[in-house]
Image (cartoon, rainbow, N blue to C red):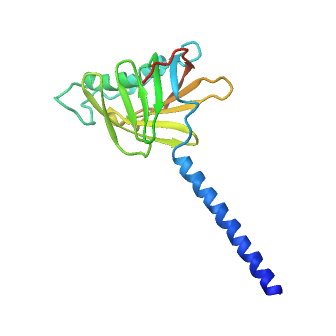
Amino acid sequence: MGRVVTRGVVVSAMLIASIGVGRIAAQDVVGDKPATDGLVGQWALNRALSDDPADQMRSMRGAMPSGRPSGRRAGGRSPEQMRSGMDAVRRAAESFTIRQDDSTVVIAYSERILTLFTDRRKQKEVVGDDVEIEYRAWWEGGKLLIERKLDEGLTLTEEYSAHAGTGRLHVLTRLEGDRLPRTIAFVRVYDPAKDTPEG
């Protein structure tokens, strides 16, 4: 009788353990695609609450080498033209809309639409004067990260997170690279817009 009871206890323990593992696995799957309720919607820039990176940008320009850019080039662009690609990416968007479907996150700006596969796959976008930039996106701790490879070996990373207390969207931007004296970081704050366009 004791053996029967013992076996029953062992079987029950195994079932409970398997259920627990199933729940953990399910959480892992959800973790690859977090709920974006706090990010989805239309957003408008709040300049009063946002950092002004102008001083840091001027400092970074002073540290930029004056020679030939080391990054990929198209059509024999000058260094000034190549830097326009970085300018177009880092410029604060006045407003944008974030949407999500089963496989992608979409950020719709007034002049372009950025489609993100959040599995770190490499993608490309064209900005500024037909400058092609490589980027990838992923989730990290409930935050959406977008990493772009720019000229001169620079990397621009944007981290989108919802502020639970205010309902605002915070976009932490970091610009870093071996040729910079330090990492440049600033936060832009966005308010929920009243009217969200359909689509």
> In the picture shown, does residue 166 fall above or below 136?
above
Seen in the image, is 77 located left or right of residue 23? left
* Residue furthest out toward the right: 2
Task: Provide residue 123's location: percent of width, then percent of height.
Answer: 33, 39
Task: Give coordinates of residue 132: x percent, y percent.
Answer: 27, 32
Quarter holding the C terminus is: top left
Given residues 72 and 177, the one toward you in this image is: 72
Q: Is residue 153 above or below residue 191?
A: below
What is the residue that sits farthest to the top in this orientation? 48
Where residue 1 sits: x, y (%)? 83, 87
Residue at 55% of width from left, 42% of height from top? Answer: 34
Query: Which residue occupies the foreground of this view, 64 or 118?
Result: 118
Q: Is residue 60 left or right of residue 195?
A: left
Q: Quadrant of residue 66?
A: top left
Residue 149 pos. (x, y %): 36, 36
Residue plotted at (48% across, 18% down): 55
Residue positioned 73% across, 71% down in the render: 13
